Image: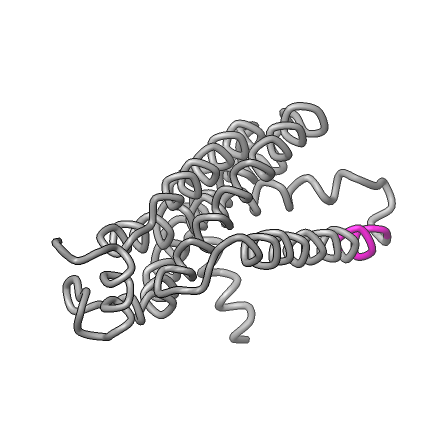
Amino acid sequence: EDEPEADRFALCSEADACRVYGLSPTSIISAIATVSGLVCALLMPFVGAVVDYTNKRWQVACATAALLVGSNALQIFVSSGTWFTMVLVQSTIGVGAYMAHQACLLAYIPELSKDQADIPGITGLCKACESSAIILFLVVAVGVGGLFIPEGPSRDVQLARVGQVAAVALGGPLMALGLGRYLGTRRALHALPPGERLLTVGVRQVARTTLTLGR
């Protein structure tokens, strides 16, 4: 605790310096991938069922957008002492909110044209816009941020903070604009089959799809 912040960041680049429950900062990517995979496997069948079988698609999109922006805002405070908490936030709330939000947005795509042959082109354009936004974000967060952040042990962490500030400051208002102006409530895509429950119908659908693919 008595070490200067720059020295603490330098120590955290070593595997044994900042271990929490056996994990070190060098394990962040693999830890997030493992935990987020489990979270999505448990969460997405239920989210998919809500999107398909209820009229709450827009409400879920708004709630997950707020969670996503909030989790990114929290990660602005990443440091040598908070990295493990940030990994938990990113791999659970952040990833879960992102995937659920994507499921809600994708459900709107078939409604953008009466001719279903247009849908692949629309999807491709959406993906191109998403990729362009990611590249622009990297240019702003890493390029511009790198010009003003001096070299040193804490530079990567400072760049991460700049990136999260940019994500919240730009992404939050754009998400609010899209949800408030261009999207809205919709009726359920399908009626819930007799005897099915919203909590389990998504899991059953995954099981049926898996069996079909196996055959």
Residue 20 among magenta residues: no
Q: Main secondary structure of the magenta part?
A: helix
Q: Residue 195: tell me if it is visible.
A: no
Left or right of 44: which side holds 78? left
Q: Tell me which colouring the rendered structure shows.
A: one colour
Magenta extent: 118-123
Q: Which residue occupies the foreground of this view, 162 or 70?
A: 162
Q: Which residue occupies the foreground of this view, 101 or 165?
A: 165
Left or right of 72: which side holds 177? right
Picture layout, residue 36 above or below residue 54? below
Picture layout, residue 187 above or below residue 93? above
| Picture quadrant where residue 185 is located | top right
Identify the residue at image location x=22%, y=53%: 81
- Residue 141 in picture, x, y percent from top left: 57, 53
| Picture quadrant where residue 70 is located | top left
Residue 122 among magenta residues: yes
Q: Residue 57: tell me if it is visible.
A: yes
The number of numbered badges drawn on the structure is 0
Q: Which residue occupies the foreground of this view, 124 or 46?
A: 124
Left or right of 80: which side holds 135? right
Q: Which residue occupies the foreground of this view, 78 or 50?
A: 78
Identify the residue at image location x=85%, y=51%: 118
- Residue 92 in picture, x, y percent from top left: 34, 50
Picture layout, residue 190 above or below residue 25? above
- Locate the C terminus and report the quarter of the image it occupies: bottom right
Picture layout, residue 7 above or below residue 136? below
- Residue 131 in picture, x, y percent from top left: 68, 58
Identify the residue at image location x=16%, y=69%: 22
- Residue 64 in picture, x, y percent from top left: 47, 37
